[in-house]
Amino acid sequence: MIENLDIYNFKEDEHEDDSEIISDLKNSDQKRINSKHFYDKKGSKLFDMISELKEYYPTRTEIEIIENQKYSFRKKLPSNASIIEFGSGSNKKIKKLLNALNNPKEYISIDISYDFLIVNAKEIAKKFPKVNVKAICADLYQLESINKIINDNSQKIGFFPGSTIGNFSQNDAKKLLIGFKKILGKNSFLIIGVDLRKDKKVMEKAYNDSKGITAKFNKNILKVINKKIGSKFNINNFEHKAYFNEKKKRIEMHLVSRENQNISLKDHDLKIRKGESIHTENSHKYSAAEFEKLVISAGYKKIDFLTDKKNYFGVFFLKVVDN
Ligand code: TRP
């Protein structure tokens, strides 16, 4: 029992996903799996390993930006605030942010992977005994349920690192940003990380590492789906593929079938041809100007834009426009 930690689980009674998984897999234009299914315990661990790879520049670049700007964070952000992290993953970034702020009052950690969330929230609660920690197991499509347990009047700082925003289409990204405003309320801030468009080779390498961890991560989604819906995907029959789609300005990840297959999805069958793919992830890459336009259209104003020497990654410091 940790005094300053409360746990909420919105994932436990969730079975409504199954029919969506099946219809996505059967989509006649392009078979796909929603990327939120990457993050079971194993997937979260693999992603953590990806974030340490030399080819995967976003995590380390973002951490470096936060570290370099900690005094400016302290100066510009309110004290006694409540920090809400959307999709927490590992603790590396939040520790830096909590250390930079003046007397943070509360840390609300939202993550999709229960075990991972709890282990990390416990660590923060112990390390920052004056901070009240709320761990909420939910995905970012559950903002309304999340909002119900976040209702005090404290000033809020939203934290959305890792370019997770890039994993949504522009339309969905805008909707998500508008959803965040409801949770954050008036006078609040949002610190959001976004991966910037750069040399295609650099971007593609980040999703095709030499150790094959990203390939493992990609294939693990099939194991998650097997467990969830009782399907019989054999991961050895698929190949990892990641490339930059120039037209859509995004890295796409796919699982390409090595042969013609007929896969049991429990009550359904899935036919997949040799060379056909299941689309598992998009990671949109923005220019700073494009991203600024997006956040302004969602009702934020830019306080600051921070980047690294190479302009690889951007951290936007935003304020909710009150209306
Ligand atoms: N937001 C990260 C990104 O787009 C998360 C991510 C999703 C990822 N899929 C990945 C990272 C595959 C590495 C490999 O980069």
Image: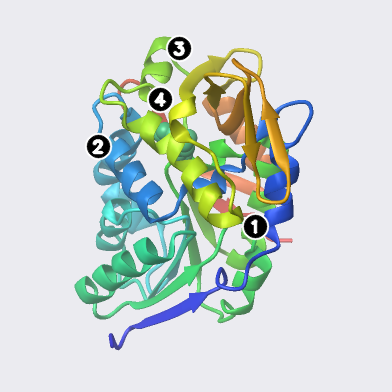
Residues marked 4 and 3 touching at CB (< 8 Å): no
Residue 304 visible (yes or no)? no
Residues marked 3 and 2 touching at CB (< 8 Å): no
Q: Is mark 1 within 8 Å of ligand 1?
A: no
- The Cα–Cα distance between marks 3 and 2, rounded to whole angstroms, is 20 Å
x then y, percent, for residue 266? 66, 50
The earlier-in-sequence mark between 1 and 4 is 1
Q: Locate residue 4: give its quadrant.
A: bottom left
Residue 207 visible (yes or no)? yes
Q: Is residue 289 above or below residue 322?
A: above
Residue drawn at x 32%, y 23% as measured from the top left: 209
The earlier-in-sequence mark between 3 and 1 is 1
Is 59 in front, or is 120? 120
Q: Is residue 135 left or right of residue 36?
A: left
Q: Residue furthest right?
A: 28
Q: Where is mark 2, residue-wise?
A: 52
Q: Is mark 4 within 8 Å of ligand 1?
A: yes
- The Cα–Cα distance between marks 4 and 2, rounded to whole angstroms, is 13 Å
The earlier-in-sequence mark between 4 and 3 is 3
Q: Is residue 71 left or right of residue 293?
A: left
Tell me the quarter of the image containing the N terminus. bottom left
Q: Where is mark 3, residue-wise?
A: 200
- The Cα–Cα distance between marks 2 and 1, rounded to whole angstroms, is 28 Å
Please tell me whether mark 4 sits on a helix, a strand or a loop: loop
Please tell me whether mark 1 sits on a helix, a strand or a loop: loop
Residues marked 2 and 1 touching at CB (< 8 Å): no
Q: Where is mark 1, residue-wise?
A: 141
